[in-house]
Image (tube, grey):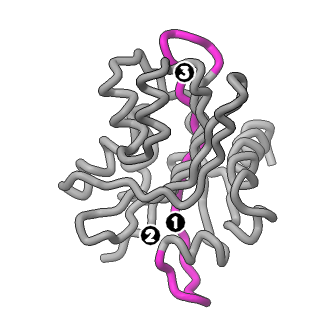
Amino acid sequence: MSTAATDAFARAAALVTLFAKPVESFASLEPVLPSAVPEPYRGLLDHDSHMTVVMERFHRQTLALRVLARIDERGDPAAWYAREILLVDATGAPVQHGIVRIDLAQVGAETAARIRAATEPLGKVLIDAGLLRQVQRVEILRVEPGPRLASVMGIGPGEKTVTYGRVAGISLSGKAEPAVELLETVVPVRG
């Protein structure tokens, strides 16, 4: 595995282990070049935009947020907030799984409160807040859902499938260090 691939896997695994251990119970994650990713996955993942915007355009509808789990250490100002989510369509069917880790100290109290309320996708909150955002270090992953990820995506037991995701960071207001680290995986597109 190349250094870049090792780094992409390590970044993704660090996010997964916030909510699922071992990583293998969650999914097999293999960094791949964008040129190796079939459509529509490549178009959905290989960009520097917010996934919510891209997924809503692809599905031609507003998507809702469903929070599966969260880590919120409110007492520690240096703590990060993390959550595992699904973006769901109007029928409630999942279209994207995500794990995000956010340095709330970089977003301001009002934006942090909206993020903690967990009623809207993160991309929408950051856009509405008018924060200067730069999606960076995007690496594409080939994902074979394990039992844990398959279950939340609605993939039947024993159903072998492959999908794709990305690991990325979002820096805010021109800072070099990302305020947001994320792993976003597209629910397998059928038909």
Residue sitting at x 32%, y 69%: 92
The residue lying furthest to the left in this view is 60
- The residue indicated by pointer 2 is 188
- The residue indicated by pointer 1 is 163
Estimate the spatial distance between the alpha carbons at disc 2 and disc 3, rounded to whole Å. 28 Å
The stretch of residues the image draws in magenta is 154-177
Query: Crowding near pointer 3: few (<14 within 10 Å), some, many (20+)?
Result: some
Q: Please state the horizontal and vertical placement of residue 129, each as a whole percent of the image.
A: 35, 22
Residue sitting at x 26%, y 50%: 56
Front residue of 119/96: it is 119
Front residue of 173/40: it is 173
Residue sitting at x 28%, y 63%: 89
Label of residue 171 in the image: 3
Name which quarter of the figure residue 82 lies in. top right
Choose mark 3 or mark 1, whichever is in front.
3
Q: Quadrant of the C terminus?
A: bottom left
Amino acid type at mark 3: Ser
